[in-house]
Image: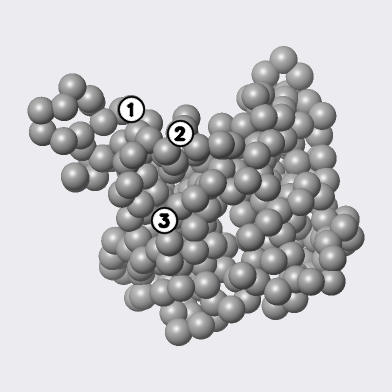
Amino acid sequence: MALVRHRAGPRLALTRGPHAGRLVVPANHSAAPPEGSADTGEEPRHYGAHALYSDDGGRSWSLGLVDDTYDGFVNTSESTVAQLPDGRLYFNSRDQLGTSPGNRADAFSGDGGAHLDRPFAPQHTLDRVPVVQGSLLYAGGRDGVLLFSAPSVPDARAEEAVWASGDGGRTFTKALTVDRRKAAYSDLVPLDAATVGLLYETGVRSPYETVEFRRVPLAALTAHLSDSRSPE
């Protein structure tokens, strides 16, 4: 199957491991249906995630990992990525109307985004996230925490929240409900050693009325985590 269209997400600059300095862009695509199919390629079962990477500061780019299962179980879309302390990449993706339980899926890459260690699989500890884009951020240095932001009502885009993982993405726990109003897309950014920023769509009648920015103390997102914080 050929990749017939794609959309890219936020760029990540790797800071550790054998691929330090590499730029990685998580992206998603729709694949061309098999010859003779009545499908157009717009059907969710043809969706997939992929990554682009550059080792020369963005002057040239290569196609890295490609999620090409196309079986309708997990329809990856709008993937995002963070680098873990051991150098691996953690990818988390919207599941666009797949038959798997929940609406989020994840995967790891140990070679800087060139390949997946395993196919995308449902992330059951994020089952309360609706079908929507989400954001990842590893914050707090080598002994920090992996954060994820999205709305937190399973069947509606509402109640923006932040989840935290102390085990490198194996499990997430809801750490903070930021807003009780309707909410949609979001983006997490580091502000300083003790603070992260959250930019998100929100509103009363619609989740797209306005865009707000919140400063969130990192301590408020990590207080609930246990002392066991080793990655997978």
Nearer to us in this view, 96 or 59: 96
Q: Position of residue 212 (x, y in %)?
A: 73, 37
How far apart are the alpha carbons under marks 1 and 3?
Answer: 20 Å
Quadrant for the N terminus in the image: top left
Mark earlier in primary sequence (3, 2):
2
Q: Residue at x 34, y 39 (%)?
A: 71
Dot 2 amino acid type: Gly
Which image quadrant is residue 32 in? top left
Provide the residue designation for mark 1: 43
Under circle 1, the secondary element is: loop
Q: Is residue 135 above or below residue 113?
A: above
Under circle 2, the secondary element is: loop
Q: Is residue 72 above or below residue 171?
A: above
> How many numbered circles does the render carry?
3
Under circle 3, the secondary element is: loop
Residue 98 is labelled as: 2
